[in-house]
Image (tube, grey):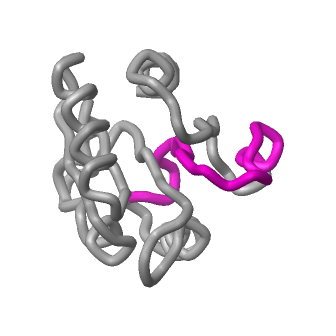
Amino acid sequence: MPAPVPSETILIVEDNEIERDGMAAVLRQAGYAVVAAPSVDVALAYPDCKRLPALIVLDMMLQGKDGLRFLEERKKKPSLAYVPIVIVTGLDVAGQEWGESLGAMAVLKKPFDAEDLLREVRKFA
């Protein structure tokens, strides 16, 4: 089986439909392909054998399995284990040091604007 090919696809893991659709619209308008996952299980099932997301935008407060669970379970999936992550969250404890301790490249505190999202995505995708 051939090795996966990196892409300019951004995987958004967000259970709030309005926020998920808003981030997807901003990223698509900037030229990125977007896959939106409403849950951890859907996000973990996304990658196929040919294309990987260039970046994962991950909400931490999800219904069912949360962002921490996603971070744990992705380590078991070679296709996702090394994809950079930008955390988006409203958690008060969230900061760059906290995010880095979880393996994320950056943390965006909610609410944020489109330019904040694009700035972080452009750094890593």
- Residue 85 at what x, y percent from top left? 52, 45
Residue 59, compared with residue 114, is above or below; it is below
The front one of 5 and 106 is 106
Q: Residue at x 39, y 72 (%)?
A: 40
- In the image, which residues are magenta? 80-100
Query: Horizontal placement of 98 versus 63: left or right?
Result: right
The front one of 89 and 51 is 89
Q: Quadrant of the N terminus?
A: bottom left
Query: Looking at the rendering, which quadrant does residue 107 occupy?
Result: top right
The front one of 7 and 86 is 86
Q: Residue at x 51, y 50 (%)?
A: 82
- Residue 108 at what x, y percent from top left? 59, 36
The number of numbered badges drawn on the structure is: 0
- Residue 115 at what x, y percent from top left? 43, 16
The front one of 46 and 18 is 18
Q: Residue at x 20, y 53 (%)?
A: 2
Residue 31, compared with residue 8, is above or below; it is above
Residue 27, compared with residue 74, is above or below; it is above
Query: Horizontal placement of 83 versus 110: left or right?
Result: left
Q: Quadrant of the C terminus?
A: top left
> Is residue 120 a member of the stretch shown in magenta?
no
Q: Residue at x 26, y 26 (%)?
A: 26
Query: Looking at the rendering, which quadrant does residue 48 occupy?
Result: bottom left
- Residue 15 at what x, y percent from top left? 34, 64
